[in-house]
Image (cartoon, rainbow, N blue to C red):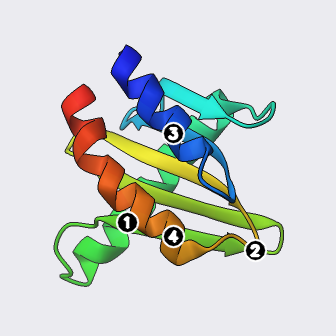
Amino acid sequence: MEELHKILEGLVEVSGIDVAVCVGRDGFVIDAASAGSSDTEAIGAMVSTGMGSAESVGRELGLEEMDQAMMEYKGGIVMMTALGRDALLAIVAVKDANLGGIRLQVRRSVPKLEAAL
């Protein structure tokens, strides 16, 4: 799990990312890294539910498996990415973050995170 934490810390070092959380599909946090004092346990529970809802929409529309969901708020961005069948990555970023750069870093990190799990 040490490798998992290093990967999450690396994501938090990306400009604009405040929180990186690896969450089980049950909503329990596996590991997390944060630039501040965010409640990663609460984030984990909420994004697990959000990811489940987003996946239901895709299934209902016949869009196959979901890779990533993103929600933009006035105060920031939440990105959720599937990590295999049993986990997901949640990213919380500032509102003016470079989304392309963050998506690229997340895409590069997913295979490493899956291997570390």
Residue located at (33% from left, 60% from top): 107
Q: Is residue 8 visible?
A: yes
Q: As shown in the figure, which amino acid type bears the numbered disc 2?
A: Asp
1 vs 4, front mark: 4
SS for tag 2?
loop
| Label 4–label 2 contact, CB within 8 A | no
2 vs 1, front mark: 2
Residue located at (39% from left, 15% from top): 2
Q: CA distance from mark 1 to mark 4?
A: 15 Å
Earlier residue among tags 2 and 1: 1
Q: CA distance from mark 3 to mark 1?
A: 19 Å
Few, some or many residues within 10 Å of mark 2 (<14, 14–19, 20+): few
3 vs 2, front mark: 3
Q: Which residue is mark 2?
A: 96
Q: As shown in the figure, which amino acid type bears the numbered disc 4?
A: Gly
Q: Quarter of the image for the C terminus: give it.
A: top left
Earlier residue among tags 3 and 1: 3
